[in-house]
Image (cartoon, rainbow, N blue to C red):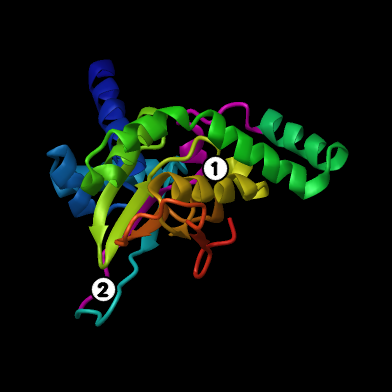
Amino acid sequence: MEELATRERSTRNRVARSILDHGPSTVADLAGRLSLTQAAVRRHLDSLVAENVVEAREQRVYGTRSRGRPAKIFALTDCGRDAFDQSYDSLAVEALRWIERNAGGEAAVAAFARDRIEAQGDTYREAVETADPARKTEALAKALTADGYAATARNAPVGEQLCQHHCPVAHVAEQYPQLCEAETEFFSRLLGTHVQRLATIAHGDGVCTTFIPHSAPQTNSSASVSTAGRNPA
């Protein structure tokens, strides 16, 4: 009996981890990725919902909606994300609050955020600079994944999307969106083109999504960050 419970918990953790790594998912998505039946996935999801680890949402439909009810998608809750490497949040928020109050206000927080991403950016630079020009976004995604961001790159109309399915500092960024803004600016400089942040976990979205258009690389400082349509976090 204990062995069965352990196996059930292990599979339930795999379901939650799959949602973390791939973003909000349908039952069919999870069943395909994990080689489980849809009935088994639903059983585990029911338990995860009861534990407030995941929540069900209505799937967004773009364009003409087909007949029938839209499939539900399941996303991690804040409680669920807390289980994945989100420690020291309170300390980080207190430190940034001190900086804001005593060392120059919001501008000082923004300067800290830029210095932070620059300091951890050497690995990202190396990955992008040594990659094939057509695979720079993919190389950045792999480097981000190594740092715990569970990132993927995928093709999109007239460009690519960089998706970060996990953010180790999401709770801090809820209060200090300068962290997200500095990261977006860094991606723009690194990839040599303007980018557009479409969604952020800190703002309540399931995935941090950055759109990177197909364009000629820019070799000067004119690379810019587009904020049109971007969530404020």
Q: Which residues are magenta?
A: 68-89
Q: x, y (%) of residue 162?
A: 35, 50
- Looking at the image, the residue that sits furthest to the right is 102
For residue 44, above or below residue 231: above
> Which residue is pictured at 48% across the width and 28% down the height?
85
Q: Is residue 74 visible?
A: yes
Q: Are marks 1 and 2 in contact (CB under 8 Å)?
A: no
> Which residue is pictured at 83% across the width and 43% down the height?
104
Q: Is residue 16 visible?
A: no
Quarter of the picture holding the C terminus: bottom right
User: Toward which corner of the image does residue 101 lie, by quadrant?
Assistant: top right
Report how far apart the C-alphas of labels 1 and 2 lie in the structure: 32 Å
Q: Could you tell me which secondary element the residue under label 2 belongs to?
A: loop
Q: Which mark is residue 170?
A: 1
> Which residue is pictured at 60% across the width and 33% down the height?
116
Residue count near mark 2 (Cα–Cα under 10 Å), binned few <14, some 14–19, many ≥20:
few
Inspect the image, locate mark 1, and give the three-letter code of the amino acid beneath it: Ala
Q: Could you tell me which secondary element the residue under label 1 belongs to?
A: helix
